[in-house]
Amino acid sequence: MSIHPTALIHPGAKLASDVEVQAFTIIEDKVVIGAGSVIGPHCVIGAGTTLGKNNRCYSAAQIGVPPQDLKHVQGSVGITIIGDNNVFREFVTISSGTVYPGDDHERVTRVGSNGLYMASSHIAHDCVVGDYVIMANSAALAGHVTVQDRVIIGGLTGVHQFCVLGTMAFVGGMTRANKDCPPFMIVEGCPARCTGPNTVGLERNGLSKEAILRIRKMYKLLYRGSLNTTQALARIEQEIEDTPERRTLVTFIRASERGLSK
């Protein structure tokens, strides 16, 4: 284990034998850090945080720190669970789950694996973020946001509380996302609007030409005709064969509580 002499490691923290901790970093109580991880200088790993294997935190990253939530019981330890193989660049901030007064329900901030979180991006309390997610510089998630796998969020984008970003969605830079962003689509603007399938992203994620064509047809039924959402879903189920991408999109829309970005 390589621990810089200026780093402060709480006795209650558990670090794998090959973890590197650089200068002036603070690792608090009840922290677990997996093998192969590197914690850069001036970082804070907050109490109650679990970091998986091969994570890299660059300078001044703040992972699992107390939430910016007035309901949080001051001095209590929230829970943050991070997967493997993530990169957290300079000044990334991730808040722990909120601890509510008199509530024994454990709330957790979760971040998956293989993500890239660019400088100054922010994940607020009680968010759930999937695998292979990219957040560009200064993108910010408010509390209770869900980001599904393989989503890309452009720089300076803000996502409203309780929104859901569907798998393989691309959210353009400087977007104000105040409704759910459907899977496979490009969403951008202020307020956010769906502008079409994320064709490049779908190709990069290995979807076939036939699958992308089906997604294009579903997009046209949802957004380019005169149908309301209920009518469009009925037409999709009538006209598009039952495939994983159809099930993903239809299930997402039916589960949406905030409504879709139009």
Image: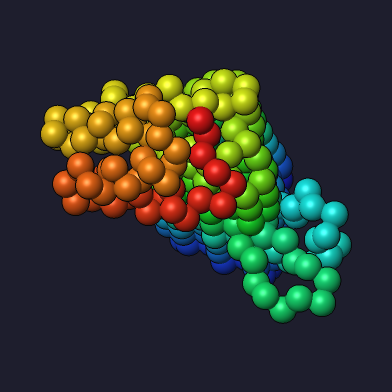
Relative depth, front residue between 1 and 86:
86
Inspect this view and state whether residue 87 appears: no
Residue 225: % across, % down? 37, 27
Number of numbered discs on residues: 0
Determine the residue positioned at 64% across, 66% down: 107
Q: Residue at x 27, y 29 (%)?
A: 216
Tell me how the rendering is colored.
rainbow
Residue, x 62% and y 25% (percent of image)?
Answer: 191
Left or right: 215 as drawn, with respect to 89: left
Q: Identify whether 12 is placed above or below 159.
A: below
The image shows residue 95 at horizontal and vertical percentages of 68, 50
Residue 151, image x and y in percent?
A: 42, 37
Question: On screen, 19 above or below 152?
Answer: below
Viewer-nearest residue: 207 or 240:
240
Which residue appears at 52% of the width and 34% of the height? Answer: 261
User: In the figure, is residue 11 to the left or right of 218?
Assistant: right
Q: Position of residue 137 (x, y in %)?
A: 58, 25
Depth order, front residue of 197/113:
197
Q: Quadrant of residue 210?
A: top left
Residue 215 horizontal side relative to residue 145, left or right: left
Nearest the camera: 172 or 60? 172
Any part of residue 160 in sight? yes
